[in-house]
Image: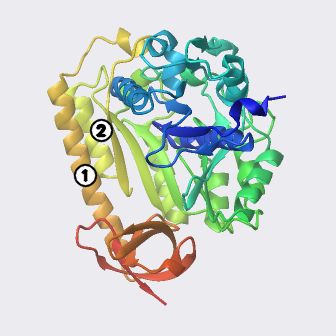
Amino acid sequence: MVDSSIFENKKAAYFTLGCKLNFAETSTIGKKLAEQGVRRVMPGEQADICIINTCSVTELADKKCRQAIRRISNQYPEAFVVVTGCYAQLKPQDVAGIKGVDLVLGADQKMDVLKYIEEAQLDKNRHSTVVTPIKDTRKFTPSCSSDDRTRHFLKVQDGCDYYCTYCTIPFARGRSRNGTIDELVKMAADAGRNGGKEIVLTGVNIGDFGKTTGESFFELIKALDEVDTIDRFRISSIEPNLLTDAILEFVAQSKRFAPHFHIPLQSGSDEVLRLMHRKYDTGLFASKINRIKTLMPDAFIGVDVIVGVRGEKEEYFSRSKDFISGLDISQLHVFTYSERSGTQALNIDYVVDPRVKQERSKQLLEISGMKLLDFYRSQQGKIKQALFEHTRRGKKMHGFTENYVKVEVNYEESLINRLIPVTLGDFNADKSALKGMLG
């Protein structure tokens, strides 16, 4: 039982770095504090508690986390500063050594933040680091973010058992684990009753859902499709080898799942995929893209690619670029390889020069830009359902269609958080969206 008096009249500030999964978790932490009477700090106020949820996907992410922790500690010098997340799990002593940090919590402790703050009694002179070795991390807490977002993010799974050679995520988040279908369905339904219209399913390796409950991702999406308080679900990043024909066929005819896929390729070279220890080849990947487009011609397909990994020789990159150019996809998310201590990739001899990495990234980003414009052009003149967001930019507002086309219309408050049929027209001024015609 938490002693609520510790949190009485306290104000908290929340900071999230990294992925959608982190945003969902931070939101859940915020709800736990709010239940004890802690309110979110307002602009100009000093916070009593700061929660910083960190990322560690690259060396640059680590650097940004350190900078953010220092900046936040300086901004709220009297606050009790709690740092959690992947960076805290991987490098707890580094985090604890940053001036202003009072409490460091690992992956297994993240959702027990109230308990650890209570133990510390908000005493800034008492510093603690509580991090369970990742091999012993077993907890799973479903989370759903709702911080003034039109879209909600529902955490359905955590951890990864794949151990790709370039990746630290299994060391930061542990083994694959998940919630039950029943509890996730309830959480989704509650989000809808509280005004949510769209939910994005998030996790580290969501296609692996069911490892701890004997269920499957296919069973999960079938159950969620019956949640009548939510208008639309999206599937976030899912491994190509786990994106089965059964899932694709179901999404194509489902009531609520959007024709929108985010699939990590990482490289279009089979040689590099083997070096990465990925669980598919380019043939399988291409077949998935073709199947999606056969079933759902208007589907948006986003693809992750990493450039400059160890072992990516010039001929491998050239092959990868040609493969990607030939895919009927909508957009690339291009990441530059970053060396991570403890990963098997460090045993690969061939190292790509940083300037070459930048040039390869530039080439793929140019391909991405062309593919996105082509996809938007293919949607012009079609009628789609757009969900409009709160954000106002001048006299314009924006929303996204079911197949993730960004739509721009004149601002009208009555449209916020509503699904509205729009006819997709010409590009807007900076070609970041299509103009929408209502009615």
What residue is rendered at 49% in x and 19% in y? 101
Q: Which of 20 and 116 is in front in this view?
A: 116
Picture disc at residue 349: none
Element marked by disc 2 = helix
What residue is rendered at 65% in x and 63% in y? 196
Quadrant of the rendered image containing residue 12: top right
Quadrant of the rendered image containing residue 60: top left
The answer to whether marks 1 and 2 mark residues whose Cβ atoms lie closer than 8 Å is: no
Q: In this view, does 154 lie above or below 419?
A: above
What residue is rendered at 69% in x and 34% in y? 7
Location of mark 2 (residue) = 320
Q: Can residue 364 be seen in this view?
A: yes
Q: Residue flagged by tag 2: what amino acid is it?
A: Ser
Quadrant of the rendered image containing residue 433: bottom left
Task: Tally the marks.
Answer: 2
Q: Which of 411 and 381 is in front in this view?
A: 411
| Residue 49 percent across, percent down from the top left | 57, 32
| Sequence-first tag of 1 and 2 | 2
Element marked by disc 1 = helix
| Residue 244 percent across, percent down from the top left | 62, 47
| Residue 416 percent across, percent down from the top left | 53, 73
Separation (CA) of disc 1 from disc 2: 12 Å
Q: Nearer the viewer, residue 15 or 370?
A: 15
Location of mark 1 (residue) = 367
**Which image quadrant: the N terminus?**
top right
Q: Is residue 286 above or below residue 381?
A: above
Q: Residue flagged by tag 1: what amino acid is it?
A: Ile
